[in-house]
Amino acid sequence: MKRLLYLLFAFSILSCSKKEEIISPDSIYNVGSVWEKQDGSKISFIDLKGKVIVTTMIFTSCKTACPRLTAEMKKIAKEVGNVDPDNIEYLLISIDPKTDTPEVMKAYLKTHQLDEKEWMFIRSNENDTREIANIMAVKYKEISPIEFSHSNIISVYSKKGTLAYQKEGLDNNIQRTAKEIKKQLEL
């Protein structure tokens, strides 16, 4: 009887312990850099764990592609519909961290009517920005003190932080991207 009680006690302890989830080697959560948000607070990609992440890289002084990328992201969010902010993050990443200060990023979100509960704008130093651009397959190059040439890519990451889908180009064809986001939200 005593043996049975020990066995039941051991089983109950094992069944109550929380299993630690292993992060995939190709997860964006492995990026260890620290980023500054539009409100000045700090964040790392691991802080977004468990959310579907929809992201693009832009700079606020851009007058051509970046406003269009932002508009496409906004259309995608509308197509996806209302989602609990704990499950999704629409993320803009600055490729011009010198210009895109927290105040500038916050103003950009406001100008484009992007709710800070669902949208985040982040910046870091040049090395961290290059690292994340390489991970996301985004190419960019400074062509003047106020202008960059860059890829137009929108990426969707699963709740585990792995790349689920990428849309390249400015074509306003948002249905496939929205469909992939909805799929990732259901997983």
Image (cartoon, rainbow, N blue to C red):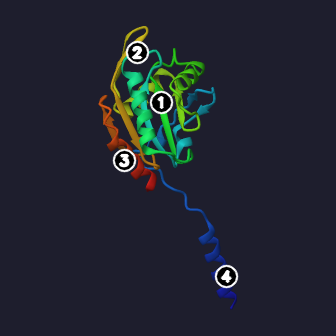
* Amino acid type assigned to the residue bearing label 2 in the image: Lys
- Quarter of the image with the N terminus is bottom right
Q: Nearer the viewer, mark 1 or mark 2?
A: 2
Q: Is there CB contact under 8 Å for labels 3 and 1?
A: no
Dot placed on the residue nearer the N-terminal end, 3 or 1: 1
User: Dividing the picture into quarters, in which one does residue 70 lie?
Assistant: top left
User: Dividing the picture into quarters, in which one does residue 67 lie?
Assistant: top left
Query: Which disc number belongs to residue 63?
Result: 2
Mark 1 nearby-residue class (10 Å; few <14, some 14–19, many ≥20): many
Seen at 54% across and 33% down, the residue is 120
Seen at 56% across and 25% down, the residue is 110
Dot placed on the residue nearer the N-terminal end, 1 or 2: 2
- Quarter of the image with the C terminus is bottom left
Element carrying mark 2: loop
Dot placed on the residue nearer the N-terminal end, 2 or 3: 2
Residue 8 lies left or right of residue 22; in this view the side is right
Q: Nearer the viewer, residue 10 or 165?
A: 165
Q: Provide residue 114's location: percent of width, then percent of height.
A: 53, 31
Dot placed on the residue nearer the N-terminal end, 2 or 4: 4
Residue 16 lies left or right of residue 120; in this view the side is right
In three-dimensional space, the C-alpha distance between marks 3 and 1, rounded to whole angstroms, equals 19 Å
* Amino acid type assigned to the residue bearing label 4 in the image: Tyr
Q: Nearer the viewer, residue 57 or 181?
A: 181
**Residue placed under numbered mark 1 in the picture:** 92
**Residue placed under numbered mark 4 in the picture:** 6
Q: Provide residue 154's location: percent of width, then percent of height.
A: 37, 34
**Residue placed under numbered mark 3 in the picture:** 180
